[in-house]
Amino acid sequence: MDRRRVPVGGGTREAFVVADTGTGHSYHIVPPGATITERETAGALAAIRAGLPGSAALVVTGSVPPGIPDDFTATVVRQARPGGIPVLIDVTGGQLRRLPGENVFLIRLDRKEAAGLIGSPIRSFDDARRANHRLLESGAGRHAVTTVGALGAVYSEPGIDYEISAPPLPGRARSDACAGDSLVAALTYRIVRGDGCLRACELGVAAAAATVSLPGTDVFEPTTVDELVRRVRVRSIAHRPGPAGAKRPGTDVGAAFDI
């Protein structure tokens, strides 16, 4: 992978994952990292801007260190807009608060971020649909994906939701570390290759399942994903889309993440 390094004055953080081998769940220990200065933030934005020409997609993912302003992701989205590059977002609440009206190509929420958005836990496909609708109706994005753990994910676009059921695992769940990252990576790859969002999300759910089947942060084989995606099941549900950017009670993303 080509990389553009952005030097900072503080020390690089080190995160680690504690895996519960009995349940397959994991606990992510992620220190905040060094505080990033305004000048360093500008350097990061410049590096992203320099990498945009010729890029097929832009993915903004992960948590942010102290010092990064809440409008950082929104600024990155605006930088990519003139080139028509599809932007995929997988970020935390502080950054999500600034996205209403930005019309991002696709936003992915995990259960924690989605719960903060609707004010209640994400336990079912219905819960995930509610989170997706909040994003779409705020004008934050044109496509939304919320994951529901072992159940799979819900992909929504204006007018229709798709419940994407995770395939049965070939064995027991061993570690859910990096499952969300695998989903985002796989669906981005398929979108760049020309697939529609639904097909890309199906592959993403299969990739997440393949990751859960492996210990720690091991990387799956593509053949495993090819086999699992054949077992993914999709159910579509039509809905009446709300107007993008509408500030209706309970649909303001910024207000929701202040809970």
Image (cartoon, rainbow, N blue to C red):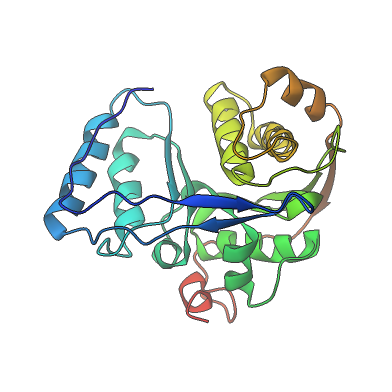
Q: Residue at x 65, y 32 (%)?
A: 200
Where residue 47 sits, quadrant-wise, is top left
Quick check: 63 left or right of 200? left
Where residue 5 sits, quadrant-wise, is top left
- Residue 192 drawn at (x, y percent): 52, 25
Numbered marks: total: 0
Q: Residue at x 82, y 52 (%)?
A: 237
- Residue 205 drawn at (x, y percent): 71, 39
Query: Quick check: can you spot residue 148?
Result: yes
Q: Nearer the viewer, residue 76 or 231?
A: 231
Query: Can you name the residue that lies furthest to the top here?
Result: 223
Q: Residue at x 72, y 41 (%)?
A: 212
Query: Can you name the residue that lies furthest to the left here?
Result: 39
Quick check: 190 left or right of 40? right
Q: Residue at x 18, y 42 (%)?
A: 7
Q: Nearer the viewer, residue 70 or 156?
A: 70
Q: Nearer the viewer, residue 221 or 98?
A: 221
Above or below residue 26? Residue 1 is: above
Q: Which quarter of the figure is the N terminus placed in?
A: top left
Query: Quick check: can you spot residue 242?
Result: no
- Residue 235 drawn at (x, y percent): 85, 45
Above or below residue 200? Residue 131 is: below
- Residue 89 drawn at (x, y percent): 48, 48
Quick check: 132 left or right of 3? right
